[in-house]
Amino acid sequence: VNAPKDFLLTEFKQCSVLAPGDAATAAHPFVAVGLVRKTQYNMVEIVTEVEATPEMIRHKFHTAAVGGESMCFDGCCPGPSDCVNGYAGEIVLTDAGVGKTQLEHTGYQEPALFHP
């Protein structure tokens, strides 16, 4: 990605911080062990693990609550709680040269609906 890792993380995980977490583990305003954040899709996530060096930020997270409104999907389809019971993931951002970042994002979800 043609962006520094701090900028990318800010844009990628834009949220409202509900609880700041452990300041000793903070690698970014949206990343600290125990941090509780509410995403733009009305999902409440908890950061469970953080590893950070000057070259890399890695964190794991999982949902604590799944949003129910469908307004983020312009009302044409079900809201997140109709489609997923929860999810977890890991994001690794690594410096890849001047102004560039390597992004690795893994996610796991528990679907609420059966899709054949």
Image: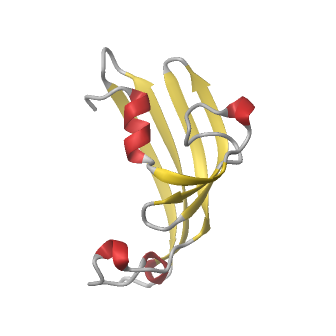
Residue located 69% across and 42% down the image = 33
Residue in the foreground of this view, choosing between 58 and 75: 75
* Quadrant of residue 100 within the rendered picture: top left
**Percent position (x, y) of residue 95?**
40, 21
The quarter of the picture where the C terminus appears is bottom left
Residue in the foreground of this view, choosing between 86 and 110: 86
Q: Is residue 21 left or right of residue 3?
A: right
Residue located 32% across and 15% down the image = 97
Residue in the foreground of this view, choosing between 50 and 6: 6
**Percent position (x, y) of residue 42?**
49, 68
**Percent position (x, y) of residue 54?**
53, 17
* Quadrant of residue 66 within the rendered picture: bottom right
- Residue located farthest toward the top when viewing the structure as drawn: 98
Q: Work out whether 12 lies above or below 24.
A: below
Residue in the foreground of this view, choosing between 28 and 60: 28
Q: Work out whether 46 lies above or below 84.
A: above
Q: Looking at the image, what colour scheme do you see?
A: secondary structure
Q: Is residue 64 left or right of residue 68?
A: right
Residue located 28% across and 32% down the image = 1
**Percent position (x, y) of residue 47?**
63, 48
**Total count of labels:** 0
Q: Work out whether 64 lies above or below 91.
A: below
Q: Work out whether 30 lies above or below 70.
A: above
Residue located 53% across and 30% down the image = 57
